[in-house]
Image (cartoon, helix red, strand yellow):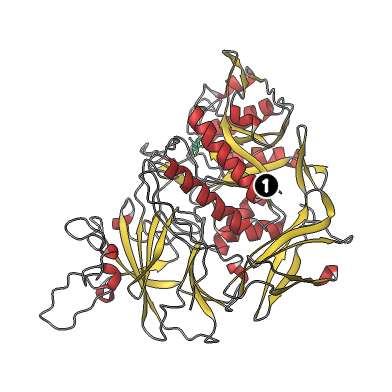
Amino acid sequence: MIRISLSIVFLSLPFFSSFSQEALIHNVYNRKTISLTGDWKYIIDPYENGYYNYRYEPFDQQESPQASAFFMNSTLKDSSQLLEYNFDNSDKIKVPGDWNSQKKELLYYEGSLWYKKSFDYEASNPANRLFVYFEASNYQSEIYLNGHKLGTHIGGFTPFNFEISEFVKAKDNFLVVKVDNKRLKDGVPTLNTDWWNYGGLTREVKLVETAPNFIQDYFIQLDPKNNEHLKGYISLNGNEIEQHKITLEIPELKIKKEFTTDKQGKAFFDISTKKIQYWSLENPYLYDIELSVQDEKISDQIGFRSIRTEGSQILLNEKAVFLKGISIHEESPLREGRGHSREDAEKLLDWAQELGCNYVRLAHYPHNEHMLRLADERGILVWEENPVYWTISWENENTYQNAENQLSELISRDKNRASVIIWSMANETPNVPQRNTFLRRLASFAKAKDGTRLISAALEQKNFQGNPAIRTIDDPFADVVDVLSFNQYIGWYDGLPEKCEKVTWEITQNKPVLISEFGAGAKQGLHGSKEARWTEEFQEDLYIKTLKMLDKVDKIQGISPWILVDFRSPRRPLPGIQDGWNRKGLISDEGKKKKAFYILQEYYKKK
Ligand code: GCU
């Protein structure tokens, strides 16, 4: 079997890491899959003794891998044999799920941990192909099946897949994964963040069976230049993908078109139709889409809408919209740890909609796909963000390639989600030449991959001409973005709330302005004077004064205050108040609302 796959393998030059993965299978969400959810065996390996020999050489780069290599999943043949690990006698851990919240001894663990899952497999058609698909794994993952190295993935929040057709057996397959969540100076994100470094197979792992020549990817969007046209492409993966017939059906629009693929197995289309019901906040209309090739049919639900800016306005279907938002971290509101389930997403978006939001900023990295599918269904606009956070190694080409690859995987996964209107390149990065180059490259890459959405980044504000009473955005990246977004913490990190009454804003760029963050910490249930930090009254007063100040920013088109729910952070140790949690949530980690929740809710009611 010849394996066709787009391998993104970087030259092993001094500044390139070499990791290979395959082109992403699109819309696994709706495909026939075999879930590997459940108990996996695991081994904690802080010295990576299961990966390197005593000369620190990787076992998986040796001609004949030794039995002591964990990916071999070795078992004793006879009692004379020396073996110092055994998956089957090891403890169990749940997948999906970060390891930190599942095992007390792993709460702060940063290092390598091995997973092993055994499974049998019977193909529904022997000619079919089989892939293993990871919704996310934080941070660096080495993947093996039956002792064969499938590849490596770097990045903790985006999906990846590997073909296993030639290695899978009918019985006793063993999938072994080494996940290393160590933070790295040259990583994306880098060493310091203000969130918990949850490690492991944090989202679902699935087997995806496909036809020999299957629909790998597609992009179906309203033509940004003509809202009576649907444009896009469909691309195949397989050995006979040239001159292949593909059918696109949208029954409600009475569209049934057949296309023929080119040499690369790709077909582009531009279909005119006059009867589209646009996806909107009031009517988040999703069309059933069906794509079929000779041996396979897949379906999807896609909304069609236009999004663009004009001067200082954001136009959704040519109508100005104010983004009544809130920032959200991907932590489960129902239990400890990373969110990953549809129920997690439902609870978070229920709270956002109870607040009166029509928009959410999914900080600071791609969230699980349930959030986007639900936002599509509920009519909630979304800002998605690449984890280029704070002070990345701007001059390291390998770091750039990593950032671009993660952004590519994000856009590949969510490019057909109507709710997503903004791709954010970064958060609070320094205005230095190397960063400007880095972000400009990312923005051009994003625009080339998806010209239908807006580009932004959470920038930082500064004094206007040295005068602290006037604030402005003085950042060359402000010339690149479509939407000018910035975080500001006047009243919390910068003076006290009454300072909001003394500051004015000078925004010189003729672009829509979003305040991507503001907020204050409060311990839920702690009451007292509004002058006393950490009381609910302080946070409430900060919201009252900030909202009044922001109403004076004439180009403001939306806000996403920081943040919906308290979240774990190693940067927040204050005993009795933080205890390892960032307390800027409008809701506590126990799901209790604070007084400021109702200030914002009231504000959105009047918007
Ligand atoms: C920053 C940053 C957030 C952080 C927040 C805070 O703006 O973007 O990630 O959590 O401020 O300090 O609470």
Along the line of sight, which residue is nearer the eye, 490 or 381?
381
Q: Residue furthest right?
A: 274
Residue 212 place in picture, x, y as percent: 57, 78
Q: Residue at x 76, y 52 (%)?
A: 281
**Cβ of mark 1 under 8 A from ligand 1:** no
Amino acid under disc 1? Tyr
In the drawing, does residue 352 fall left or right of residue 153?
Answer: right
Residue 464 visible to an observer of this rendering: yes
The answer to which quarter of the image holds residue 266 is bottom right
Residue 267 place in picture, x, y as percent: 71, 65
Q: Residue at x 62, y 52 (%)?
A: 351
In the drawing, does residue 430 fall left or right of residue 325?
Answer: left
Q: Residue at x 69, y 53 (%)?
A: 419
Mark 1 closeness class: few <14, some 14–19, many ≥20 residues within 10 Å: many
Residue 545 place in picture, x, y as percent: 63, 27
Q: Residue furthest left?
A: 80
Along the line of sight, which residue is nearer the eye, 256 or 85?
256
Residue 360 visible to an observer of this rendering: no
Quadrant where the C terminus is found in the figure = top right
Q: Is residue 369 above or below residue 168?
A: above
Q: Is residue 297 above or below residue 480?
A: below
Along the line of sight, which residue is nearer the eye, 13 or 596?
13
Residue tagged 1 = 359
Tell me the element at label 1.
strand
Q: How many marks?
A: 1
Along the line of sight, which residue is nearer the eye, 165 or 571?
165
Q: Is residue 331 above or below residue 510?
A: below
Residue 278 place in picture, x, y as percent: 81, 56
